[in-house]
Amino acid sequence: MAPRRSPLLLGFVAALSALATACAGVTRVAEPPYAVEFREGPLEVRTYGPRVVAETEVAGSFGEAGNEGFRRLAGYIFGKNKRKSEIAMTAPVAQASSSEPKKIAMTAPVAQRGTPAAWTVAFTMPEGETLATLPVPDDPRVVLRELPPSRVAVVRFSGRWTDENMGSHEELLRGWVERNRLPVTGKAEVNRYDPPFLPWFARRNEIWLPLAIEPRG
């Protein structure tokens, strides 16, 4: 005779199955292509080619700026532009701080760079798009900018978007960069690849540190 399973156990298994199905159903959007120079567990060095981002500068806390910046940029790619056309969503949404305030009135992995009171939030535009091919934003606070080729040190991790989680992984990345004598050229950037409704344990988060591009031999 087959063993009887309790309703509680069956319900727990069903819930886990439903959660796994929901997580698997989240569509992964495109991200900029990159090459990995070397990897050590969740840590690696990447190189990216030139790309275009849409940016907006937002005052407020990290979380407030991220939410408002995302709203503005989502408006741009979903039709708030001179052509009223939609642009494909990409990942990541990035966020970083800066000690030098920009004298611009509120202007756009998703990226956020900021001053103590302001942040720059950015979406990467789809591969192949240029400043000439992208529509002009309706919102004057959203701007388009071309980024040159870049090299970054990266740590990948899951979890909630808390200061503690971000800070501990930035510390891990900085220690690894220092041990490998990698030349850091700027401030850390938080990159988020998943929507907030995805369970925290299934999220892909990254911290990036910009590095000097080594000359080719």
Image (spheres, rainbow, N blue to C red):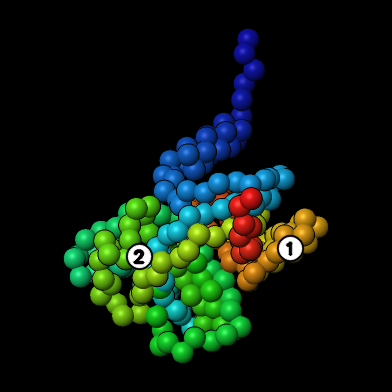
Quadrant of residue 163 in the image?
Answer: bottom right
* Residue farthest toward the right in the current orientation of the protein: 179
Of the numbered discs in the image, which one, if any, rests on residue 14?
none
- Which tag is nearer the camera, tag 2 or tag 1? 1
Q: Quadrant of residue 124?
A: bottom left
Instruction: Name the residue type under label 1.
Output: Arg
The one of 215 and 161 positioned closer to us in this rendering: 215
211 or 158: nearer the eye? 211
Query: In this view of the protein, which residue sits in the foreground, 211 or 68?
Result: 211
Q: Looking at this view, name the residue that lies furthest to the left.
A: 83
Q: Which residue is drawn at the image coordinates 67% and 45% (left, top)?
A: 38
Screen quadrant of the N terminus? top right
Element carrying mark 2: helix
In the picture as drawn, the residue positioned furthest to the top comes out as 1
Say left or right for 60 vs 186. Answer: left
Q: Is residue 112 above or below residue 12?
A: below
Q: Is residue 35 shown above or below 72?
A: above
Residue 70: x and y in percent read 42, 68
The answer to whether 134 appears left or right of 44 in the picture is left
Image coords of residue 141 (percent x, y): 35, 79
Q: Secondary structure at mark 1?
A: helix
Q: Residue at x 56, y 53 (%)?
A: 47
| Residue 129, position as x, y percentages in the image | 33, 57
| Gap in angstroms between the C-alphas marked 2 and 1 | 32 Å
Labelled disc at residue 174: 1
- At horizontal 59% and vertical 66% (from top left) the residue drawn is 189
Q: Mark 2: few, some, or many residues within 10 Å (few <14, many ≥20)? A: some
Residue hosting label 2: 74
User: What is the tally of numbered marks visible in this picture?
Assistant: 2
Q: Residues within 10 Å of mark 1 (few under 14, many from 20)?
A: many
Say left or right for 137 vs 97.
Answer: left
